[in-house]
Amino acid sequence: MTPLGIGIVGCGNVAGKYASDSKTYAELRLAAATDLDLARATAFAREHGCRVHPSLEDLLADQAVDIVVNLTVHQAHYEVTRRALEAGKHVYSEKPLALTAAEARELVELAHARGLRLGGSPATFMGEAQQTAAAVIRSGRLGTIRAVYAEVNWGRIETWHPAPAPFFRVGVMVDVGVYPLTLVTAMLGPARAVRAWGFELKPDRVTTSGAPFRIGSPDLIVAVVELADGTVMRLTTSFYVGRPAKLTGMVEFHGDLGSLAIDSFQNFDATVEAGAYGERYETVPPVRPPYAGAAWARGVAEMAAAIHERRPHRATGDRAAHVTEILDGVAASIRDAGRRVEIRSTVAVPAPMPWATGAVS
Ligand SMILES: NC(=O)c1ccc[n+]([C@@H]2O[C@H](COP(=O)([O-])OP(=O)(O)OC[C@H]3O[C@@H](n4cnc5c(N)ncnc54)[C@H](O)[C@@H]3O)[C@@H](O)[C@H]2O)c1
C-alpha cells in the first residue's frame, strides 16, 4: 500500500504523540508540518523528520500532503479545516470539529460536496478495551441497557499545560466531555436530548509560569443525555476534581441483566469488567492484546485505510458534528437553567473493528 502523506497543522503539546504514533502505520507517512509559531514548527519537523512550511497556504500547496491533520487550538479548528478542504485535502481534525454545530455541519457538507474525507477525533472507540466493551454489549450479556454513568474528572489543567487558556475558554465539556459522548454514542447510537447544569467552583487559577487568570467557564458540569433508544446517560465533567479521585474516566453501562465498567474512556488498555445484576464484576479479557495508553493516530490511519479500500471510515465528520450538536445543547441548557434541549442530527453506530467481531468471553 502506498502510504498517504499527512501534514500536521499545529505543532503543540499533542502533535508529538500523533507524529510518533503515525510512524507505526503502513498507511501513513509524515510529510510536513506548520504552525503559527515557525520556530516551533521547525523544531518539530527536525525532531520528527518532515518538511516544514512557513504557512498553512504553503502546506496546502504541498503535493505530498494528502491528509491535513488539524492539531491547532480549538478556536482555529473550523477555519483550518475549511481552508484545507477548499484546497482539496482530506482532513482529520482534533476535537471539537468546530465550536458550533452549524459550523461543524458546514464542514461535513463541504467535504461531501468536494468528495473528500473528513474525520474527527476522538477515535478512542477504536481502542482494544473500548472494542471489547462494545462486543460485550453486542453479545446481549447486559440485556437492554437503560442507564450509563460517565465520569471525566480531569483535574486542574493549568497545573501541567503551559497554555491552558484555550481549554478553559471552550470549557470542560467541549474539551473532555466529548470523549464519553463520542464513545457512548458510537456504542449505543445517537442522542435525542440533553439537559445540563454548570458551576464555577474555583474561578481563580494560576498558570505554571505564575500568571493569575480567571477560568471564565464552569469547571463542573453535570449533563443528562437521553439517547434515541431511551437510554439515559449521566455525564459529569470537571476541571476541578482530579486524581486522587477514584473515578477519573470511568464509564459504566447498566442493563436489565448486568453491568459493564470500563475504567478509562481513553486508554486502549483500560480494564473492562462485567457482571450479572446483583453479582460482582469480573474482568473481561481484551479481544486482542491492547495498545498501552492511547494510539493517537489510529483514527487517521483507519481513515487512510478506508480511502485505499474505498469504504467508509469510522471516525467520521458526521459523528463529530453530531457530538458538536450535543455540546451546543449542553451550553444552551446551562444558560437556561437545565432546560431540555432536543438534538436533531443523528448518526449510525460504526462497524466493529475487523479484529473485534468474534465472541467475547
Ligand atoms: N494536549 C493534549 O494532551 C491533548 C489531548 C487530546 C487532544 N488534544 C487536542 O489537540 C488540540 C491541540 O492541543 P495542544 O495541547 O497540542 O495545544 P497547544 O496549545 O499545545 O498547541 C496548539 C498549536 O497550534 C498552533 N496554532 C494555533 N492556531 C493555529 C493556526 N491557525 N494555524 C497553525 N497553527 C496554529 C499553536 O501555535 C500551537 O503551537 C486541541 O484541540 C486539543 O483539544 C490535546
Image (cartoon, rainbow, N blue to C red):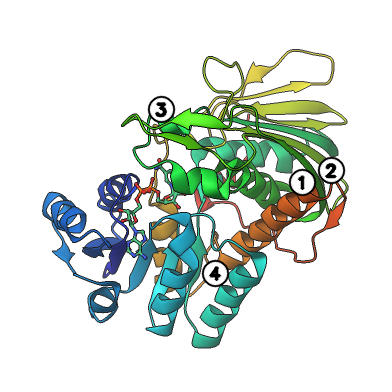
User: In the rendered image, which residue does mark 1 sit on?
Assistant: 334
Secondary structure under tag 3 reads helix
Vertical arrangement, residue 244 with respect to residue 296, above or below: above
Q: Is residue 201 above or below residue 9?
A: above
> Could you tell me the amino acid type at mark 2?
Thr
Of 62 and 341, the residue lying toward us: 341
Instruction: Say what secondary structure mark 1 lies in.
Output: helix
Q: Quadrant of the N terminus?
A: bottom left
Between the C-alphas of marks 3 and 2, the distance is 36 Å
How far separated are the C-alphas under marks 4 and 1? 35 Å
Q: Where, by quadrant of the figure, is residue 83 drawn?
A: bottom left
**Comparing labels 4 and 3, the label whose residue is closer to the camera:** 3
Image marks 4 and 3: residues in contact by CB distance under 8 Å? no
Q: Give the crowd class for mark 4: few <14, some 14-19, many >=20 residues within 10 Å.
A: some
In this rendering, does residue 189 appear at all? Answer: no
For mark 2, what is the residue?
A: 231
Residue farthest bottom in this picture? 113
Q: Which residue is mark 4?
A: 312
Question: Reading the chain from its start, which is encountered first: label 4 or label 1?
Answer: 4
Mark 1 is surrounded, within 10 Å at the Cα level, by few (under 14), some (14 to 19) or many (20 or more) other residues, namely many
Residue type, label 3: Thr
Between disc 4 and disc 3, whose residue precedes?
3
Residue 287: image location, x then y, percent: 53, 36
Instruction: Give residue 65's position: percent from left, percent from top.
Output: 27, 73
Number of numbered labels in the structure image: 4
Q: Is mark 1 within 8 Å of ligand 1?
A: no
Q: Secondary structure at mark 2?
A: loop
Looking at marks 1 and 2 on the same chain, the residue that comes earlier in the sequence is marked by 2
Label placed on residue 159: 3
User: Given the image, on which type of amino acid does mark 1 rest?
Assistant: Ile
